[in-house]
């Protein structure tokens, strides 16, 4: 039979890890089937109003940014994440990552090489980058030039479906491209650190879709102020591992089923046309249907215990509530999902439901 996926073990590239804070230096070891050294580390405090914090190996693992605000990056080497290991990371004493007794979840992505992108003909050349052409993820650090229609070569070999850009040196919002945002996603953008609905401007993506070689920036301050430093995270669909799609809510407790082709380990959902939070679910917290609590990418609020909103299934997810954050009747939603297990692996063996 035809090969369904080339990634039988998604834990090679993504893992969600639960841990409890100790209030002192704490080495967290990931418990996935395969060792993973995180290139992107996104930590949420589940118990208290702290964070959420994001780190990556290109900016430096001790440089923190927070997805619930527009602030610049800050050096947290003295009290936050101090090191990335071959299968985990070490946190120090900061309350957003290691309060004694608080519960945390860490979302960990592996990237890859620091070679493989082109520079010929590009307007902006990254000062640092890490890409993985199997899991289709890229991390890019660059300096803005303030020029419309500026292109950066991404080296993924496919068209990115989901892009997040943040200025490291300016107090600007987290700017998001999602290929299912609207019927013309190149003209629009979402904001990760707020609830606002999608907005239309030509100064973000310069009204140009990314392609298999490049992504394009406008002259807007959120993505390309001259002399400002930025980081961009790019992702693309990989069958059986990652999916960046959209769906329409039905406003019914027997909600919309969304097929991803895998059992999600991580799921983030955003209502596009109306202001609403970025809801995050995962397979580790609670760990059974329908009890899937959610966090918010745009808020430092602790975990929401409103069980019963959503089922995580062997081949996708299904809303089980009329909550407008995930299932307003007739409204458009976008999502980003990463797999715990492919629905069918390369040997033709299906995965179990939860």
Image (tube, helix red, strand yellow):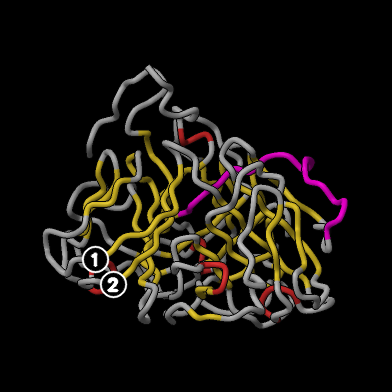
Q: Which residues are magenta?
A: 106-122
Give the image quarter of residue 232: bottom right
Residue 16, above or below 67: above
Give the residue drawn at x 70%, y 69%. 217
Q: Residue 148 at x, y = what percent?
A: 76, 75
Main secondary structure of the magenta stretch: loop
Earlier in the chain: of badge 2 and badge 1, it is 1
Q: Which corner quadrant holds the C terminus?
A: top left
The reply, left or right, for residue 24 in relation to residue 151 is left
Give the image quarter of residue 222: bottom right
Residue 284, above or below 322: above
The reply, left or right, for residue 288 in relation to residue 140 is left
Q: Closest to the observer: 256 or 33? A: 256
Crowding at dot 2, Cα within 10 Å, few <14 / some 14-19 / many 20+, comes out as: some
Crowding at dot 1, Cα within 10 Å, few <14 / some 14-19 / many 20+, comes out as: many
Numbered label attached to residue 249 = 1
Q: Residue 115 at x, y = what percent?
A: 79, 41
Residue indicated by mark 2: 331
Residue 147, above or below 7: below
Numbered label attached to residue 112 = none
Q: Secondary structure at mark 2?
A: loop
Give the residue drawn at x 32%, y 41%. 263
Q: Closest to the observer: 84 or 137? A: 137
Q: Residue 98 at x, y = what percent?
A: 50, 61
Is the residue under label 1 in contact with that under label 2 (CB below 8 Å)? yes
Q: Residue 216 at x, y = what percent?
A: 70, 64
The reply, left or right, for residue 286 in relation to residue 71 is left
């Amino acid at each position: 039979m035809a090969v369904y996926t080339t990634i039988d073990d998604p834990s090679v590239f993504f893992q969600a890890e639960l841990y409890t804070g100790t209030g002192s230096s704490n080495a967290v070891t990931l418990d996935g089937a395969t060792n993973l050294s995180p290139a992107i580390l996104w930590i949420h405090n589940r118990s208290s109003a702290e964070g959420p914090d994001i780190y990556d190996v290109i900016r430096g693992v001790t440089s923190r940014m927070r997805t619930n605000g527009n602030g610049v990056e800050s050096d947290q080497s003295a009290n936050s994440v101090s090191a990335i290991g071959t299968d985990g990371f070490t946190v120090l004493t900061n309350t957003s990552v290691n309060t004694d007794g608080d519960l945390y979840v860490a979302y960990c992505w592996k990237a890859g090489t620091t070679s493989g992108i082109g520079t010929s003909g590009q307007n902006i050349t990254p000062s640092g980058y890490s890409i993985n052409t199997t899991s289709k993820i890229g991390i890019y650090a660059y300096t803005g030039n303030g020029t419309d229609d500026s292109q950066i070569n991404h080296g993924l070999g496919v068209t990115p479906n989901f892009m997040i850009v943040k200025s490291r040196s300016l107090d600007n919002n987290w700017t998001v491209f999602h290929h299912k945002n609207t019927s013309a996603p190149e003209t629009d953008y979402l904001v990760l650190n707020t609830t606002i609905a999608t907005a239309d401007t030509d100064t973000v993506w310069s009204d140009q879709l990314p392609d298999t070689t490049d992504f394009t920036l406008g002259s807007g301050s959120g993505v390309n102020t001259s002399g400002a430093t930025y980081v961009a995270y790019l992702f693309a669909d990989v069958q059986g591992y990652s999916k960046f799609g959209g769906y329409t809510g039905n406003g019914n407790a027997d909600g919309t089923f969304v097929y991803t082709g895998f059992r999600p380990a991580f799921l983030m959902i955003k209502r596009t046309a109306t202001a609403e939070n970025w809801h995050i679910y995962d397979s580790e917290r609670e760990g059974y249907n329908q009890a899937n609590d959610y966090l918010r990418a745009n808020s430092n609020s602790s975990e929401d215990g409103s069980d019963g909103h959503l089922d995580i299934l062997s081949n996708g997810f299904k809303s089980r509530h009329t909550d407008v954050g995930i299932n307003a009747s007739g409204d458009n939603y976008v999502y980003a999902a990463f797999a715990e297990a492919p629905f069918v692996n390369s040997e033709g063996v299906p995965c179990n439901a939860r």
